[in-house]
Image (cartoon, coloured by chain):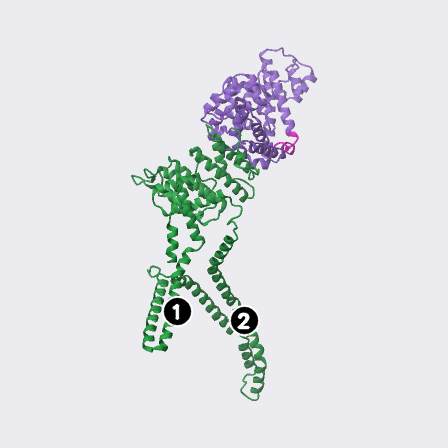
């Protein structure tokens, strides 16, 4: 009932406003669900009920067994049947992922099973290896063998007594050496076992600790991320919202409006890296095989979405290249881009294609890069401003990365191309192009805001 | 509001002042990317950035300072620029990549006639002129008026694409075909330099020019100017490679030796054809042949190779000019 109450509260639309405001509210709730481990808690509620039922069954059986054995046996049988049934579905859920009777226990078992197996295997193999090694290099055996050889034939004449005396005297020392060696071989792998257990435990308890911290910070009224302005927080919220919508919706109009909004978000702050892949997917969904099956073309009616998604891809990819150039998402997208770009395309006349190529050129290595000319790239003023702004950041980051040697030539070529345009580009673009040049020349423009970077036109 | 442009100008000036060629070499692409904006500002009455660009370009010591990527934008660049900017920046335009752009030559020619003549302008015009002339397709676009810029004889910098490519044989031939000895002499005076050797075929063309155009009488003062120039060049070469490398580090041993060889040969040829011209004149004028004084004839024989080979023993050299000319250099 408690869970039902929470879900009702989540589903309720308790505010009015624009679509964006309502989406932000929904996103805030969703973020709360994730942050407060709502799904885990919801799973925990039936578990608690089941545990309570089990305790009741056990207690009742125990009580009725004392009153009347027959009644007690019936209740015990019912309880045992319930437990067996539960264990069965637990095992079934753990063994087969497609089994519909999934429980939190089967999830946990499935998670722990390979780890436990690995731990057991490694421990067993360590013990076996250590034992073999100990036997092979055993000091005790060596002592016995040496004495046997020395007193050969030890059973004849009066040799038996000295032989036994020596054995008795030397064996304790050999035993101590063997024990020491055995301990030294086994102590490291065995010590790894509690460390593994500790890590597993900390992984399980981390959410609880995090939850505790969250509650603590809430109670003491501290801000979640100090230094983060309200606008920035809203942008983060918006970006999460956009990410969720692009991923969950398959409606092209929803994609168009969402990505159209994303294209206006400047500057991008913290966002889910998978948004890059989502934008790429959105673009790929706009292209299809040509009429004569030669190459791919942009599907009729989706030109606008293709343009917007390509711009968003450029925007997000270049931002991620700055913030996390080693991101696995980027590598994944790069591989997919190379696969797509190797296909024969008939898109060269389309603006979105050039934007994609520009983004792809930034992502790929020089040797993988196909010839891309900024001269073919004639974007709108808005798009050009976004591209220029991103390229300044990327230039700065790459300049730092190359130990202050140079800005990538692709970016410098953009500056040359944009400054050569007739008519001249907007002021902000000129300022950004000059910033790129300044960075390559070794000037520090990181402290200048975009207003300060503006030049008189 | 102009923080970035000021910062860039300051930075480029600082790089130029360090006189570190490696640093300028490593930043030539960035400086080139600045050119369109510098040209644009110059037209708006703010020439500082363009002047900085030019300073960097001349100081770099690179034959083609500008990034080749700029070739796609030259037409818009020239369309935006003032005549002064066109003239001053044109030596740094990659003309070798614009072989089919006759329209740009016309644009440049129009700009040359619209700027006041100064030493700097003359230098840039001549440099560009020779670069354009070195491209066969563009050569016919050069008018007689443009060739006349050569007579201003500006001194070109140690590293100069115009002078380097200006000794192509077809350029020398085109200049000779003008039939203007003043322009031809100026061309030779400009292209003969201690910084650049002549192209092989160009060298042959120049030799032919010496024989036919300067081997006749009536061009004595031109001949003297050429000899003087060659003496200056050879004098500079005599100072040694290290001395020249102080101003042009790119100068190589091979080029240095080639230059020495070429300019010495040119001097010899200049002298040789000069004497032959005088001998023929003497014969044609049917000068009275009589036995001359022994010391004069002996001196002539000893000191001049021409005398040793060409003049018969019984020729009386009354006119003292060949001897004096032979002794003079």
Q: Is residue A114 left or right of residue A216?
A: left
Figure check: A331 above or below A86: above
**SS category of the residue bearing label 1:** helix
- Front residue of A6/B151: it is A6
Most distant residue in the bottom direction:
A157
Q: Is residue B239 magenta?
A: yes
- Front residue of A365/A195: it is A195
Most distant residue in the left direction:
A292
Question: Is the residue marked by circle 2 packed among few (<14), some (14-19), or many (20+) residues within 10 Å?
Answer: some
Quadrant of the frame with the N terminus of chain A: bottom left
Shade representing chain A: green
Figure check: A102 above or below A367: below
Of all chains in the rendering, the one displayed in purple is: B
Q: Is residue B73 left or right of residue B59?
A: left
x and y percentages locating residue B292 in the rendered image: 67, 14
Q: Is residue B203 left or right of residue A304?
A: right
Q: Quadrant of residue A100?
A: bottom left
Q: Which residues, given as a range, are shown in magenta? A: B237-249
- Front residue of A102/A159: it is A102
Q: Is residue A361 magenta?
A: no
Q: Nearer the N terminus, badge 1 or badge 2?
A: 1
State which chain disc 1 sits on.
Answer: A
- Front residue of A34/B312: it is A34
Question: Is the residue marked by circle 1 packed among few (<14), some (14-19), or many (20+) residues within 10 Å?
Answer: few
Q: What whole-number distance in Å separates the C-alpha atoms at marks 1 and 2?
A: 44 Å
- Residue at image mark 1: A55
- Residue at image mark 2: A183
**SS category of the residue bearing label 2:** helix
């Amino acid at each position: 009932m408690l869970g039902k109450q929470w879900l009702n509260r989540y589903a309720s639309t308790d505010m009015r406003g624009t679509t964006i405001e309502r989406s932000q509210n929904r996103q805030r709730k969703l973020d709360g669900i994730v942050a407060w481990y709502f799904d885990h808690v919801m799973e925990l509620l039936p578990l608690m009920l089941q545990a309570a039922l089990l305790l009741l069954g056990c207690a009742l059986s125990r009580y009725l067994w004392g009153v009347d054995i027959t009644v007690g046996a019936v209740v015990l049988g019912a309880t045992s049947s319930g437990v067996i049934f539960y264990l069965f579905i637990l095992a079934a859920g753990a063994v087969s992922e497609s089994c519909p009777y999934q429980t939190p226990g089967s999830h946990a078992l499935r998670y722990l099973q390979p780890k436990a197996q690995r731990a057991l295997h490694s421990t067993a193999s360590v013990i076996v290896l250590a034992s073999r090694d100990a036997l092979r290099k055993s000091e005790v055996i060596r002592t016995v063998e040496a004495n046997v050889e020395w007193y050969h034939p030890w059973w004849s004449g009066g040799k038996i007594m000295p032989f036994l005396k020596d054995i008795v005297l030397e064996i304790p020392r050999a035993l101590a050496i063997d024990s020491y060696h055995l301990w030294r071989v086994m102590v490291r792998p065995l010590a790894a076992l509690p460390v593994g257990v500790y890590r597993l435990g900390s992984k399980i308890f981390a959410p609880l600790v995090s939850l505790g911290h969250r509650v603590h910070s809430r109670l003491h009224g501290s801000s979640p991320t100090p230094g983060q302005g309200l606008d920035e927080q809203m942008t983060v919220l918006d970006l999460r919202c956009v990410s969720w919508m692009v991923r969950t919706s398959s409606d092209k109009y929803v994609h168009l409006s969402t990505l159209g909004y994303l294209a206006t978000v400047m500057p991008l702050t913290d966002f889910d890296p998978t948004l890059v892949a989502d934008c790429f997917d959105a673009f790929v969904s706009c292209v299809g095989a040509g009429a004569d099956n030669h190459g791919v073309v942009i599907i009729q009616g989706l030109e606008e979405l293709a343009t917007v998604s390509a711009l968003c891809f450029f925007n997000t990819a270049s931002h991620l290249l700055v913030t996390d150039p080693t991101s696995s998402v980027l590598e994944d997208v790069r591989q997919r881009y190379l696969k797509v770009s190797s296909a024969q395309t008939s898109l060269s006349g389309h603006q979105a294609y050039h934007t994609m190529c520009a983004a792809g050129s930034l992502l790929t290595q020089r040797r993988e890069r196909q010839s891309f000319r900024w001269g073919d790239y004639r974007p709108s003023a808005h798009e050009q401003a976004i591209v220029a702004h991103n390229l300044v950041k990327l230039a700065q980051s790459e300049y730092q990365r190359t130990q202050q040697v140079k800005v990538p030539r692709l970016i410098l070529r953009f500056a040359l191309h944009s400054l050569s345009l007739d008519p001249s580009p907007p002021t902000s673009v000129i300022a950004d192009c000059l910033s790129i040049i300044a960075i390559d020349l070794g000037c520090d423009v990181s402290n200048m805001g975009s207003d300060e970077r503006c030049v008189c036109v | 509001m102009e923080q970035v442009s000021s910062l860039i100008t300051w930075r480029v000036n600082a790089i130029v002042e360090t006189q570190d060629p490696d640093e300028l070499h490593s930043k030539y692409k960035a400086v080139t990317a600045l050119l369109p904006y510098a040209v644009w500002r110059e037209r708006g009455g703010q020439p500082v950035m363009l002047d900085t660009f030019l300073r960097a370009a001349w100081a770099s010591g690179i034959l083609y300072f500008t990034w080749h990527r700029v070739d796609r934008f030259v037409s818009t660049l020239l369309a935006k620029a003032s005549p002064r900017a066109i003239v001053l920046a044109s030596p740094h335009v990659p003309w070798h990549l614009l072989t089919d752009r006759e329209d740009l030559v016309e644009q440049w020619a129009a700009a040359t006639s619209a700027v006041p003549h100064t030493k700097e302008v003359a230098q840039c015009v001549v440099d560009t002129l020779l670069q354009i002339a070195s491209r066969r397709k563009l050569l016919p676009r050069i008018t007689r008026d443009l060739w006349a810029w050569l007579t201003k004889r500006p001194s070109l910098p140690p590293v100069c694409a115009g002078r380097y490519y200006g000794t192509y044989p077809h350029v020398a031939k085109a200049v000779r075909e003008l039939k203007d000895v003043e322009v031809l002499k100026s061309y030779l005076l400009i292209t003969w330099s201690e910084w650049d050797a002549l192209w092989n075929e160009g060298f042959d063309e120049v030799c032919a020019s010496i024989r036919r155009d300067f081997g006749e009488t009536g061009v004595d003062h031109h001949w003297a100017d050429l000899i003087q120039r060659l003496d200056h060049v050879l004098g500079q070469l005599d100072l040694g490679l290290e001395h020249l490398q102080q101003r042009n580090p790119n100068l190589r041993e091979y080029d240095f030796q080639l230059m020495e060889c070429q300019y010495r040969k040119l001097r010899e040829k200049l002298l040789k054809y000069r004497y032959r011209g005088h001998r023929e004149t003497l014969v044609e004028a049917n000068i009275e042949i009589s036995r001359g004084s022994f010391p004069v004839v002996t001196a002539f024989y000893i000191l001049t190779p021409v005398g040793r080979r060409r003049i018969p023993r019984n020729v009386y050299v009354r006119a003292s000019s060949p001897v004096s000319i032979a002794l003079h250099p």
